[in-house]
Amino acid sequence: MKILHIITRLIVGGAQENTLLTCEGLAKRGHEVILLTGPSEGREGSLMQRAQTSGYRVITTPHLVRAPHPWHDAAAYFEIKKLCRDLKPDVVHTHSSKAGIIGRAAGWHVKTQDKPIVIHTIHGLPFHPYQNAAVNRLWITLEKWAARRCDHIITVADAMTMQAMAAGVGDGRSSLFSTVYSGMDVEPFIHPRTDRASLRQQLAIPANRFVFVTIARLQPLKGHDDLLQQAEALFAAVPDAHFLWIGDGVFRPRFEAAIRAKGWADRFTLTGLVPPERVPELLPAADALVHPSYREGLARALPQGLLAGLPVISYDCDGAGEVCITGKTGMLVPTGDATALRAAMVQLAADRTAASQLGETGRLLCLSRFPAAVMVEQIEAVYRRALANPRP
């Protein structure tokens, strides 16, 4: 098959890692893969170098930008249509909301004898309860419109399918959706290249600390403020508690100022931005993963922590409950209930043997669901079913 993938930008993020692993895996399975992407700039980092050295063709365009821009959006639409006419792909597979809307429209309206099938992956819905009502309605309208212009929709969690259908996306057709969990290279998490003692020494984390790690950008709706709000009470209940925050973002200066003002500099370790391959090397320093995000598809941080053998604590956000299972792999608490989040952290730290057992159970669960090869095989099966039943 010839497959054209389209994504807005290649920053360091879950949707981008998913897309690159998909491209890499499909190319290794003998398919001709082309990736179209827009500018990747800013403090989120870039995965462009990895994409350009992974065995498939990468095309960049200045018009595929994240923010709404009538001129750039129209230019991207016509550029994608021309690419489809020139390349004649069997499959057009779009990722992320902006690229998904423009790419689905362009791929669907290509006027060639052999039209490509159009597939879209929902990594996280663009509409959510925390945005302006008018913006929310606009995104729902656009997603409903775009869903009528594709052959199939892949979601990274069952929760994404349910939320999309509840909003009317796909006109109530459950057959339009398939869940394919976001795959990853599991081996570095199972067999990390770093050991706990030397890593803690490197990070200046005392050996006797109980470390709660968070992997997320330091930006709105990721929940770091909730952790700061509960930190004083947590330290009173768990005197050896320590936070390890992996990620960077616009809130970092404010967080660092607040930590210094409270005198907690020896209780927090902020790594800043790290490349994805560095994440499994850092996790042996931790005892548990806490993920207080208010919205996600299914955060890759949760299976990453579980694959590393860490119990997980998460807000009951979108697909989190599909891997963070209270009493089995960790503890799930109501979204936004910071007090319950802290109570869960205290409970895990109080019974460290039980916490370790939760992590081991989670590791086995994620080993069956999240290997990149499993994801690629399932996506390829979606393509073959869609090709066997082309649209009228």
Image: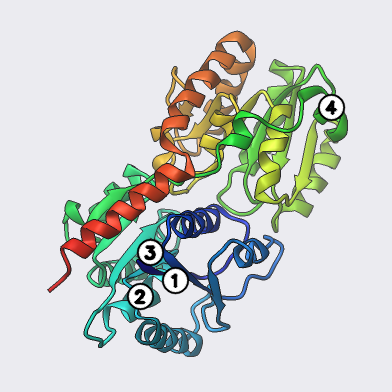
Q: Earlier in the sequence, mark 4 or mark 3?
A: 3
Q: For mark 2, does the 10 Å Cα neighbourhood hold few (<14), some (14 to 19), or many (20 or more) residues? A: many
Kind of residue at badge 2: Pro
Residues at marks 2 and 3, CA–CA distance in whole angstroms:
33 Å
Earlier in the chain: of badge 4 and badge 1, it is: 1
Mark 2 and mark 4 lie on one chain; the one further toward the N terminus is: 2
| Residue 136 marker | 3
* Vertical side of 221 occupied by 10: above or below: below
- Give the x, y percent position of residue 388: 18, 62
Mark 3 or mark 1: whose residue is earlier in sequence? 1
Query: Comparing marks 2 and 1, which lies closer to the viewer?
Result: 2
> Which numbered marker is on residue 89?
2
Structural distance between the alpha carbons of marks 2 and 4: 49 Å
Label 2: which secondary element: loop
Q: CA distance from mark 2 to mark 1?
A: 21 Å
Any mark on residue 150, and which?
A: none
Q: Residues within 10 Å of mark 1 (few under 14, many from 20)?
A: many
Left or right of 207 in this view: 331: left
Residue tagged by mark 1? 98
Q: Can residue 129 be spotted in the picture?
A: yes
Q: Earlier in the sequence, mark 2 or mark 1?
A: 2
- The label on residue 198 is 4
- In the image, residue 379 sits, relative to residue 196, either above or below, namely below
The structure's colour scheme is rainbow
SS under mark 3: helix
Which residue sits at x=55%, y=82%? Answer: 61
